[in-house]
Amino acid sequence: MATAHSKIKVATRIRPILQGEQTDGGIQVVRDGSERSHMSVRNPRDPSQVFTFPFASCYDEASTQEEIFERDIQPMLDAVYNGIAVTIFAYGVTSSGKTHTMQGSAAQPGITPRAVEALLGRRSLMEDRDVSLSVSYMEIYKDDVYDLLVPKEKAVKLPVRENEVGEVFVANLSSEPVNTVAEFDAMYSRASKQRSVGATNLNRASSRSHAIVTVTVESVDRRSRQEMIGKLLLVDLAGSENNKHTGNDASRMAESAAINKSLSVLGQVVHALNTGASRIPYRNSKLTRILQAALGGNSLGLLICNLAPGTKFRQDTLNTLNFASRTKNIENKPTVNQQKSDAVTATKSGIPAPSAENDSLQRHDRPPRTSIGYFKKLRVSNVPAANPPELQPQPKINNEQHNSSSSSTGPVAATLTEDEINARIAKAVEAEVARRLAEFEHHRSPPLTEQRDEEHRGHPPKASASGSPRISPRKHRSLDIELKQRLGEIEDKYERGSKESQTSSSLTPASRKKTGRAYVALARAQSEKNNLQLALELYRKAETYVPDNVKLKERIIEIEWAVKQDTPFNPSPKRAKKPKKTKPHRRADDAASDSQTLVGGSGTYSDVTENKENFLDAAQYPPAKRQILDETDGLARKRHKAAGLIRKDWD
Ligand SMILES: Nc1ncnc2c1ncn2[C@@H]1O[C@H](COP(=O)(O)OP(=O)(O)OP(=O)(O)O)[C@@H](O)[C@H]1O
């Protein structure tokens, strides 16, 4: 039987213009008369340029909650009843309409209440099966997981665990049985009030956390006692934020940093899956760990990208659509969770069947019966789902994860201090970077000796696409050599030390910064040589070490664009350094937080505009404009300092 692959489906939705919002109509849904549609977005920097992004469904400002539900959600619910996990997540910049789409209001209920109602409605149609529904509801706030079904004062941080077959679950998360729509509405509205929400300049009720509702549908065939467990995960992500617009205070800034960081990791996971990376960084945030099955795993997926039409969000829109374009390439392998429903099978697994006394609230400190994938090892057969074609037991997911904590706390940990272990981890990663870079360079570029020979033979050095490289080829080579030497030294040092394999998340902030910087320098050198594909890969590598660097993201988008259009990329010179006296003193712990975020996630239009300006020679600007830029920068620095975050310019 062939394995069924299913790509993540992507839909986009533009929210209506809010009161006082400025827009220039630069973002539109375009339909070609058939079912096909695409988003058209004007380049904020060059209005003559229009980007187009085709997606399965594009909804404009006039779209209704019902329309989206009927067209894109309803058809996926069959799969849930057929024992498959389905994940629907809303993504977008703050205030773009994610909560409206997922949760909605009493007058305009969103996807979540509609989906539960539809699932409950289907129950009566299942004549030969006993069906039960239960719901859990959690939020991920500042990278900690909380149960929204328990009163806030009693809510504790819940651990995210993995069972012996590598499936991730949230331990001790409660779930409640749901039999009627009224029951669900009461529970959902009570729990949603507990979600962390705060006012920002961009949204009076901005979600400060990612919220995940999980509806579990268990159905047992009355005759064969075969049980199927389907799941529906409804995810309302917090929105990426530009703190120049949000007007956040210190505590909001800390929330914002956590939101932007986790969204950034989500972007990295999507990127790693797209490029077939051997290591997918699911472990770098709780969000991606929990959504692991939905991203390259055994779940069916729908990503709804919410877009804000305001002009100031234009760059966010482009970032969101770029993310969406990458996500739609991800292939999942949906599998049916099916088993014989009897106590013997359950106890055979070593995990007791749920006790009869289990009342309305079930707690799980081990993989719950309903956890996605728990039945993988109990599964006795596969059933084809009504909708998806053929479904197979889940093949091994390409999600190799290097668990550095286990290696660093083995025999080494017994004799070394934590600092020493950290230092070794840092060295190991740097060594890995060095080795990969050397390999990369070896395969991609002609050996330096060959280049030198060419010059000796009188061939002029290759110019960049612009025809006027700012860095001479000689300088490129010396930069490459210098960096390789530096990385070689690190590797040598490491060779004399430990051999653990590591992840970027295990590095100290200083080491992450250093490694990221090395990649940026190499990438820049490659882009100067017009090796754009290679430069792009190196910039992306850098991003895995400094995921929240907005300028780096901007550079990646620019090069992606150049590669896509097959046009030359004209790298801008380094930002002119400001006079020393305007810079506040940097403490050691400031340096350590360099890899933290100024704004993360996707950045925003004005942010990028400013960054773009930073790439340009400051001397090109009239004094008044330079002063404004300096003041904005000073203000931002003050705010970030207050929140323990300091901006660091890369490149
Ligand atoms: N399709 C829509 N129709 C009418 N109003 C909408 C729509 N989408 C969003 N809104 C309104 O826009 C505002 C912002 O929406 P919402 O709170 O859903 O954004 P969000 O993306 O969840 O923001 P955050 O990430 O900050 O939580 C709200 O007042 C909401 O009611």
Image (spheres, rainbow, N blue to C red):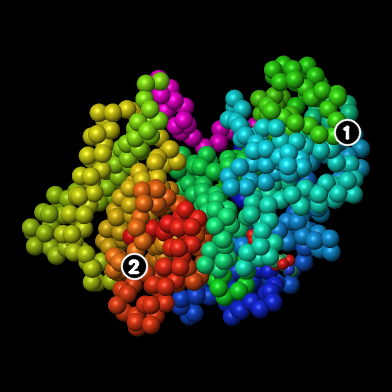
Asked if the stretch drawn in magenta spans residue 400, the answer is: yes
Camera-side mark, 1 or 2: 2
Kind of residue at disc 1: Asp
Q: Which of 189 and 265 is in front in this view?
A: 189
Tag 2 residue? 582
Coordinates of residue 98 in the picture (x, y in percent): 68, 59
In the picture, measured across the screen, residue 563 lies left or right of residue 133, that is: left
Observer able to see residue 283: yes
Residue, x 83% and y 46% (percent of image)? Answer: 187
Kind of residue at disc 2: Thr
Packing grade of label 2 (10 A; few <14, some 14-19, many >=20) is few
Residue, x 68% and y 27% (percent of image)? Answer: 366
> Compared to 211, does 367 lie above or below?
above
Residues in magenta, as a range: 386-413
Answer with the quarter of the image where residue 439 lies: top left
Coordinates of residue 180 in the picture (x, y in percent): 90, 45
Q: Find numbered disc 2 in the image and state the secondary structure of the residue it sits on.
A: helix
Tag 1 residue? 130
